[in-house]
Image (spheres, rainbow, N blue to C red):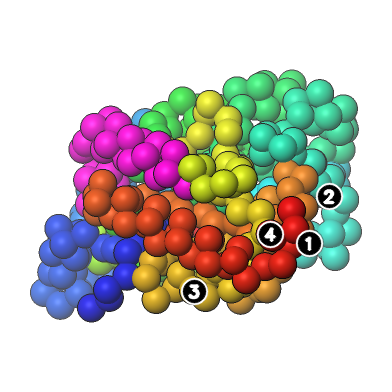
Amino acid sequence: MYSQLYFDYNATTPCTKQVVEAMLPYFQEHFGNPSSSHHPYGWLAKSAVEDATTKISKLLGVSPSDLIYTSGSTESINMVLKGVCRKQRNKGNHIITTKAEHKAVLDTCAFLEDDGFDVTYLDVGSDGLIRIEEFEERLRSETVLVSIMYANNETGVLQPLEEIASLTHKNQSLLFSDTTQALGKVHLDKVLQLVDFACFSGHKVYGPKGIGLTYIKGNGEYDQLPSLIQGGGQQKRQRGGTINTPLIVGLAKAVELAYRNLDEDTLRIRSLRDQLEAGLLNIELSVSNSRTPERLPNTVNVSFPYVDGANLLTALSPQIAVSNGSACNSASVEPSHVLLAMGVNRSLAYASLRLSIGKHTTSDDVERAIEIISSEVLKQRESNILWERR
Ligand code: PLP
């Protein structure tokens, strides 16, 4: 259908055939509502949802009761941030997050600011990491929530959650971490032990769009997080609305497949990433924006000085699907807020590409991508007077 190379797996992934096959019976044959408790249609759907939840919880190393299905990470982020703030208002009105978060977090924080919360946006260094000393200094007795992502969607940088969790909990604050990009790319059991809340989207792991999860540690043991969506009393009254059996079955299948060969897939993908990164860094003056040892195995982010970012993307678009930031920001003509937060200057941030590798990427794809990008960068520079005068 497309002649393009696909290097945008962090934006979304194709739904795996086995996932689609697992879902199909639940659209027609087993169409019951899991909340219909008086007939076998409902019982069968309920049991499919319970099996899916058990499977996912085992793979993630958490309790099934700690998982609430949502439409995806954006909803989960809204649920956690707004829910915690609403619930803890008596304790304080301060949130700490970072300038490099996904817009789903930043926009929810802006909403909470309008609602009277005080939000501290931590800087990140040129390596994309927060400075732990600065974080420690910014914690206050009124800090109710810390929201720091684990894996950055644009650079793949992994934040040091162990230290962050220890300081957050010492301060008796709660910790939410956006783990959307980490699922299926790195092991998460340790991370989920450290945080109080996390979030996932099915479509990032070769599952369907429109389904995700909120992880709430100890859900039910303590007072529950208030629901973002009222109605129907489903999911322990924490998320109203008919439970989406087919998508939940699909999500469980996708997570199962992601974990089946996680270590081998990671090794293969990491080696492709290194091949891609090395090839792009062979382009004169190019710089990597993803330099930490702890990072996702699939993400490459490189800036090309003396190149107009918009022209580069336009020239590449018929040949290769890449991005210059988060897919959710693609309507924006602004340079990546993540790179700006890292101190990359505007024109260089604009002339940057994020390439993300996935299950279907081959070494040949990588070689072709390097060739295409190298030749386009060269072309762009040839028409740039500053390049001649450099
Ligand atoms: N958080 C991160 C880090 C993401 O990469 C994304 C999607 O790109 C989201 C949150 C939002 O996920 P969704 O659009 O599936 O709700």
Pick whichever, 223 or 106, lies toward us. 106
Q: Residue 5: x percent and y percent? A: 32, 64
Residue 14 picture quarter: bottom left
What's the distance in space between the residues labelled 3 and 2, CA to CA?
A: 39 Å
Q: Which mark is residue 119?
A: 2
In this figure, which residue is indicated by the disc labeled 1? 110
Magenta includes 274?
yes
Q: Residue at x 23, y 78 (%)?
A: 1
Q: Which residues are magenta?
A: 252-280
Please tell me whether mark 4 or mark 3 is closer to you in this view.
Answer: 4
What's the distance in space between the residues labelled 4 and 3, CA to CA?
A: 18 Å
Q: Residue 181: x percent and y percent? A: 47, 47
Q: Are marks 1 and 3 in contact (CB under 8 Å)?
A: no
- Closer to the chain start, of discs 4 and 2, is 2
In this figure, which residue is indicated by the disc labeled 4? 387
Please tell me whether mark 4 or mark 2 is closer to you in this view.
Answer: 4
Q: Residue at x 53, y 61 (%)?
A: 377
What's the distance in space between the residues labelled 1 and 4, CA to CA?
A: 40 Å
Other residues around mark 4 within 10 Å, as few (<14) / some (14–19) / many (≥20): few
Q: Is residue 151 left or right of residue 35?
A: right
Please tell me whether mark 1 or mark 3 is closer to you in this view.
Answer: 3
What's the distance in space between the residues labelled 4 and 2, CA to CA?
A: 42 Å
Pick whichever, 57 or 263, lies toward us. 263
In this figure, which residue is indicated by the disc labeled 3? 315
Q: Residue at x 28, y 55 (%)?
A: 365
Q: Residue 223: x percent and y percent? A: 61, 42
- Amino acid marked by disc 2: Val
Direction front: furthest residue? 388
Other residues around mark 3 within 10 Å, as few (<14) / some (14–19) / many (≥20): some
Q: Which mark is residue 6?
A: none
- Closer to the chain start, of discs 1 and 3, is 1
- Amino acid marked by disc 4: Trp
